Amino acid sequence: MSKIVQGLYYTTHHDWVKVDGNKAYVGATDYAQHALGDIVYVELPEVGEEFGVEDAYGVIESVKAASDAYAPLSGKIVEVNSELEDAPESINEAPYEKWLVAIEMSDASELEKLMDASAYEDFCNKEA
Amino acid sequence: MHKYIPNTEADKKSMLESIGVSSIEDLFSDIPAELKLGRELNLGEPMSELELVKHMNELADKNKSDFVCFRGAGAYDHYIPSLINHMLLRQEFFTAYTPYQPEISQGTLQMIFEFQTMLCDLTGMDVANASMYDVGTATVEAAVMAVQNKKKCKNVVVSKAVAPETRLILHTYLKQNDIEVIEVDTADGVTDMDKLTAAVGDETAGVIVQNPNFFGVFEDVEAIAGVAHDKKALLIDVVDPISLGIVKRPGDIGADIVVGDAQCFGSALNFGGPYIGFLTTKSKMARKMPGRIVGQTEDTDGKRGFVLTLQAREQHIRREKATSNICSNQGLCTLTVAIYLSTMGKSGLKEVALQCMNKAQYAYKKLTESGKFKPLYNKPFFKEFALTSDVAAADVNAKLAESNILGGYELECDYPEAKNGLLFCVTEKRTKEEIDCLAQVMEVNC
């Protein structure tokens, strides 16, 4: 059973979202890192780029596959976790600590469309 | 029996029966009739082996293959050590296709690994891919990498002293990517620095320079790299790999991506192909590099082994996002390069480069002695130099051909300003006698 953290929002792409004021930190869930396997490369956008919901903002590449990372919310990138450039494998080690980007939300009501921890747990069980 | 295929009618009949169709035509029933030729191919009658060898020899005899070659311009007549064919023609290498189950092909992987390692050493870069078609495609792929590297870019800048063919290929490709190719004029045989500085802007992804350039002249790569880097553009350096035996490594003078054609490393002229493009770059660009990389690792028993460690995944998984359609490499030519460099070694390559340069200097001196032929440019060069005279270039070459000499490349077709210009190339294969003979014919007969 993958680890799921209470108090976060979740997406069907297995991303977690942690809200901090008008900022949303986005990362990959434990389920996602298990599915991907050893992560070897993360390609992130630049600060200032804007994305809509479901826009691909980056790439996570593992030894098995390359997957797009989709924006869970619309808004502007205000921070990127550049330490992942040299240590992408840290996502495997601590998925809920290693956020990928921080988005300045342009419409906080979009959060209502995301899952909470228990809905995400059901979703994962169905996926499995 | 078919003209070229050895199966008998009985063979065909039994094969067709076993798959449940009545004729070969049935196998092509999904191709609309109007697309089919509707007749036999217009080919000659079959021949016995003896007749065929005779026929091919007659065709080959029509070639002027005994000319002494003083022409380069991208295709070079360098010495090919006899060791190469002994290794190259081994069937394990010669008949092998691209390794789809790569780890089974340890020999092929090791050969590619050695190729990459030596190319990185030579160019002063961190990573090399497993080779590309030729210098043109390698340059294009480098340009596409530069575009990938810089968001919101709109153009790449290329010096007109980059080979004309390479620039044509660049235009063809980049048109599809909506990237403008800005060409920069030359001044006295090198890239015009003022014009280059004016052309390179914030929206420039990469600057492409050839060194030594198409005219054989050395460019100030460091200064050009400075212009590129000031605008956060990458410097793409197109090199003559033979020159790397004696000149500073591109990686040490500001190049971000190094490309070139390694035909000069052991491949024959081959009527213009197959040649072998190479591309090397810094670690930080490795993920953007097309093609594949072979890595060295250990198996579960700790034994050394080779793996395909990084191929642009998009080519297999996310093809709609691919930035390159290169997923092959010039395997046999790669092997040629690996054998050539292993045979020559560092000192051997240095010797080849020095001989090219010294002999080219001697030829230049001999050909310009009387003043009948004048240098087009007054700049340091490697193994090629451009001359001009009052005689049309084609006439000079016609006279040289009468003496079984392949004269210089006629520059006017690509560079109208180089009136009566001839680009001569002198490799380590040329002897003093051959050079003296060239000078004699040009002086007396032209």
Image (cartoon, rainbow, N blue to C red):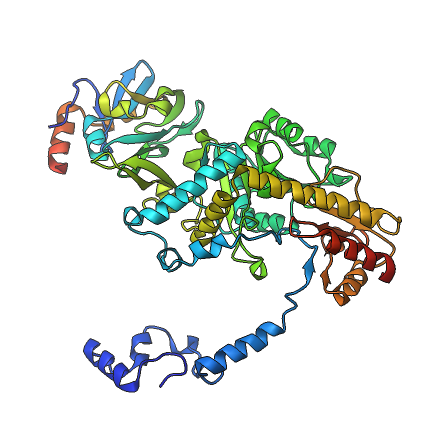
Where residue B386 appears, as percent x and y from the top left, is: 76, 48
Would you say B141 lies left or right of A123 here? right
Going 53% across and 36% down the picture, which residue do you hit? B122
Residue B359, x across and y down, in percent: 71, 46
Q: Quadrant of residue B304?
A: top left
Note whether residue B177 is visible.
Answer: no
**Residue appearing at x 63%, y 70% in the figure:** B63
Callout count: 0
Q: Nearer the viewer, residue B241 or B321?
A: B241
Q: Is residue A84 visible?
A: yes
Near-viewer residue (B262 or B413): B262
Q: Residue B221 location, x and y as percent?
A: 64, 32
In depth, the one of B144 and B360 nearer the eye is B360
In terms of image quadrants, where is residue B97? bottom left
Q: Residue at x 64, y 28 (%)?
A: B222
Question: Looking at this view, is B40 or B273 the one in front?
Answer: B273
Where does the C terminus of chain B fall, quadrant-wise? bottom right
Q: Residue at x 41, y 83 (%)?
A: B3
Q: Quadrant of the N terminus of chain B?
A: bottom left
Is B179 positioned to the left or the right of A13 in the image?
right
Q: Is residue B11 above or below residue B105?
A: below
B380 relative position to A127: left or right: right
Please, is residue B396 above or below residue B429 in the view?
A: below
In the picture, measured across the screen, residue B188 lies left or right of residue A25, that is right
Q: Position of residue B239 (x, y in %)?
A: 59, 41
